[in-house]
Image (spheres, rainbow, N blue to C red):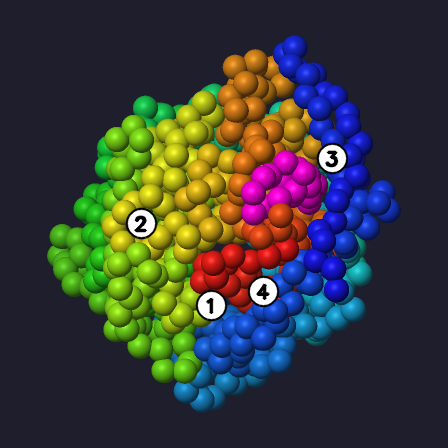
Amino acid sequence: MSLTPPVAERRPITRTHHGDAVVDEYEWLRDPEDPATIAYLEAENTHADEATADLESLRGQIFEEIKARTQETDLSVPVRRAGWWYYTRTVEGSQYAIRCRCPVLDADSWTPPDLEAGEDITDEQVLLDSNVEAEGHEFFSLGAFSVSDDENLLAWSVDTTGDERYTIRIKDLRTGEVLPDEITGASAGATWSAGASHLFYTTVDDAWRPHQVWRHALDPASATAPGTEDTLVFEEPDERYFVGIGRTHSEKYLVIGLSSKVTSEYLALEADQPEGEFRVILPRRDGVEYTLEHAVIGGEDLFLVLHNDGALNFELASTPVDEPGELTVLVPGSDTTRLEDVDVFARWVVLSYRRDALARISIMPITASGLAPQHEIDFGEELFTSGVGGNAEWDPPVVRVGMGSFVTPSSVFDYRITLGDDGDVADDELVLLKQAPVLGGYDPAAYEQHRVWATADDGTRVPVSIVCRTDVARDGTAPALLYGYGSYEASMDPGFSAMRLSLLDRGFVFAIAHVRGGGELGRHWYDDGKMLNKRNTFTDFVAVARHLVDEGWTSSDRLVAEGGSAGGLLMGAVANLAPDAFCGIVAAVPFVDALTTILDPELPLTVIEWDEWGDPLHDPEVYAYMKSYSPYENVGAHPYPAILAVTSLHDTRVMFVEPAKWVARLRATATGPSATGEAQILLKTEMHGGHGGVSGRYAAWKERAWELAWIISTATSASRGA
């Protein structure tokens, strides 16, 4: 068995921008219709399998560990909507969830039925069995799952290739009949009008950008036959903007949302007037972002607007529904707190925000005179993540929330509130409904989590979240995995992972570097890691790696780095910038050929990305800056750590060609152990997956076991050949 890696053919082309001529030997790999491209990807897959054949036993062991920790036959916590409890089931041996509902038997009770305890289920209905939907397909993804207001119709959509173009179908839940209506080429979502006479959805352009909103009419008398031809409701020509449609939580308004990376705009229409004209609420202004929700405060219909106009970290304001425009501030902006989302109910407004790099939730009861002061939920842990979800009703007596941490499995609570005479919160209680079971005797006391701070080259303090077993020595001998992302203001929170236990129980330290470009410390943290500040993301990550070594958490020859998508760009950049800081790097669907992609407005999603990275096509300064860090452009003749690049053939967000070209150039250019094969450079392509990889939980577990085995071996071996 040969362990000689494939060698990609060189077919040089030259591109020139701003007077700079660049030779690219591997751009030909972009064409998935070229048999040579597929042959190369398959050869790389064969090589990856051969080079890691000795890990087969470890992969199998890790997969069985993941299974053993998972309650394979399980139920979600039921969510009440009108006269039904909605929930999902998983069944041992089945890849996908089954979506069900059962009637609410006691209209006055908001305590969900304890299905796991064997409480009787009366007249359970199976709404959608994704295992049946997925039969005959290598890949399956459920997009829309939308029940009409009268609870009688279900609209759902599926993607069976991974390209994120969905087919929408409709079922009559009273009879189980699938209606003849079928909508192809849609985006993931679907939204009902009030009365279920119409269904709204979006479609994408050739660049995979959702740009049109359509209205599909059903026969209002029977809802069993297609109505008239679908009507184009809205089209956004500006290629910087994504388009979506939904309903306010009150269900009173249909809302079209437009968003670029830096600007947004909303249009609204009464949901019971689906053939009416949408009206702009606040016209777009470059650099102003906002979200929109409907509230009734003091008997007045208002739109609540979460915006950043003069408030870097956003503020919450209101404007009249009938004459929107002038804003009244409800929660002012703050230098230390980034307001992220607002959920509105009949009785209270729920704010989600971030302070000190932690996601938090507060409640503001609605009183006769306005909003009561914020009341923050205390989850009782130093590190945690939290969120609002599972609240389908407009006027519930409780708020459904979730939380978890590195050591606490994901937990679902009903937050019960008692109001005083002044309308403020007098008493509150978190009622645990379910904590994700971790089988096999998991003991959270055996693990510890920490928040530490590394110092970047420019003196900036960078937060780091760490988890390990309590018996791990701080003498540099522990293997470690350092994860990072650092783009799009996305925050990487310290949540629980049962799969991660396969690392921790082998003595690993796991850490997240909350680098600039993410949103952990507010909008300024994001701004300091984008556009012409992007290098801060990479130097922050290297600073965190050095800090972990200096403080005895691990050593550089035991430290593996991991990131995906834009986090894969981070991986490629630090591989060039500080290859000595890591013994291995996992780059999942990595954005490593960033300059080539952002230069081509014909490629999927390129133009909208100019507000994140800059526009190198028209701006020579941006071109030079991106060229200085783009991983593919900067592969050098020096040793690299072991590298595992993982991609999917049908990924429309980060195309497979980027890691394919990167690996080809690494193999041709790197020196030392990377050139001799002592440090692996591997490319693994999922031939039937999308941006999220394979579909199905067992397939995903096997995929992760493959990666974890490589991480464990790389961090605990002096070197790995091939």
Secondary structure at numbered mark 3? loop
Residue count near mark 3 (Cα–Cα under 10 Å), binned few <14, some 14–19, many ≥20 = many
Q: CA distance from mark 2 to mark 3?
A: 37 Å
Q: Residue 624 versus residue 227: which sits nearer the camera?
A: 624
**Mark found first going from the N terminus, 2 or 4:** 2
Per the image, is 19 magenta? no
Per the image, is 674 magenta? yes
Q: Residue 20 versus residue 325: which sits nearer the camera?
A: 20
Specify the quadrant that holds the N terminus: bottom right
Secondary structure at numbered mark 4? helix
Q: Which residues are magenta?
A: 652-675
Tag 1: residue type? Met
Residue ranking furthest to the top = 19
Secondary structure at numbered mark 1? loop
Q: Residue 660 versus residue 306: which sits nearer the camera?
A: 660
Tag 4: residue type? Trp
Specify the quadrant that holds the C terminus: bottom right
Q: CA distance from mark 4 to mark 3?
A: 27 Å
Task: Say which residue label 1 marks.
Answer: 499
Contact check, label 2 and label 3, Cβ < 8 Å: no
Q: CA distance from mark 1 to mark 3?
A: 36 Å
Q: CA distance from mark 4 to mark 1?
A: 12 Å
Q: In the image, what residue occupies the spot 63% across and 12% down? A: 18
Q: In the image, what residue occupies the spot 52% across and 73% down? A: 62
Quadrant hosting residue 240: top right
Q: Position of residue 427 (x, y in %)?
A: 16, 63
Tag 2: residue type? Leu
**Mark found first going from the N terminus, 4 or 3:** 3
Contact check, label 1 and label 3, Cβ < 8 Å: no
Task: Say which residue label 2 marks.
Answer: 548
Tag 3: residue type? Tyr
